[in-house]
Image (cartoon, helix red, strand yellow):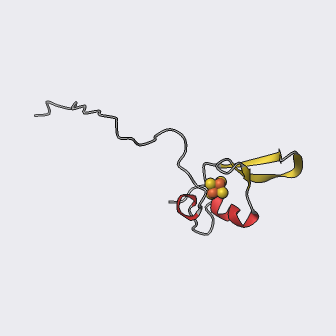
Amino acid sequence: MSETCPHLEYREEGDGRSFEVARAFCTATGSFVQPMRADVCNARHGLDPTTDCEFYVEPDGETGDGSDGNADEGEGGNR
Ligand code: SF4
């Protein structure tokens, strides 16, 4: 299911200017979003930021190097 992109913010100022209405800002590119792309950012019309935006990157954390060797075997003794 599509959700609004986690990199999307609304800012009333940027690039040394301020705006009367907050504009869509992408923290992944560090720039304001073009109106057409805002549909992707907001996951409108069945669009999905994770697959339809070439700027999308996974949110912070989890670099996925597979070093988490957690072999916990709890939950025993149910006879
Ligand atoms: S969909 Fe793309 S352009 Fe829009 S906020 Fe996310 S990464 Fe940025």
> Residue sitting at 59 percent across and 61 percent down?
54
**Residue 27 vs residue 47, the one in the foreground:** 27
**If the picture is divided into quarters, which one holds ligand 1?**
bottom right
Horizontally, residue 69 falls left or right of residue 25, namely: left
Horizontally, residue 69 falls left or right of residue 64, namely: left
**Would residue 36 be seen by someone viewing this image from the given angle?**
yes
**Residue 19 vs residue 2, the one in the foreground:** 19
For the C terminus, give its image quadrant: top left
Residue 9 image offset from top left, x and y in percent: 70, 48
> Residue sitting at 61 percent across and 69 percent down?
45
Would you place residue 46 above or below residue 25 in this image? below
Res 76 → quadrant: top left
Residue 47 image offset from top left, x and y in percent: 58, 66
> Residue sitting at 58 percent across and 55 percent down?
56
Horizontally, residue 17 falls left or right of residue 73, namely: right
Res 64 → quadrant: top left
Would you place residue 60 above or below residue 74 in this image? below
Q: Residue furthest left?
A: 79
Residue 49 image offset from top left, x and y in percent: 58, 59
**Would residue 42 be seen by someone viewing this image from the given angle?**
no
Q: How many numbered circles are shown? A: 0
Would you place residue 72 above or below residue 29 in this image? above
Horizontally, residue 77 falls left or right of residue 64, namely: left
Q: Residue furthest bottom?
A: 45
**Residue 62 vs residue 24, the one in the foreground:** 62
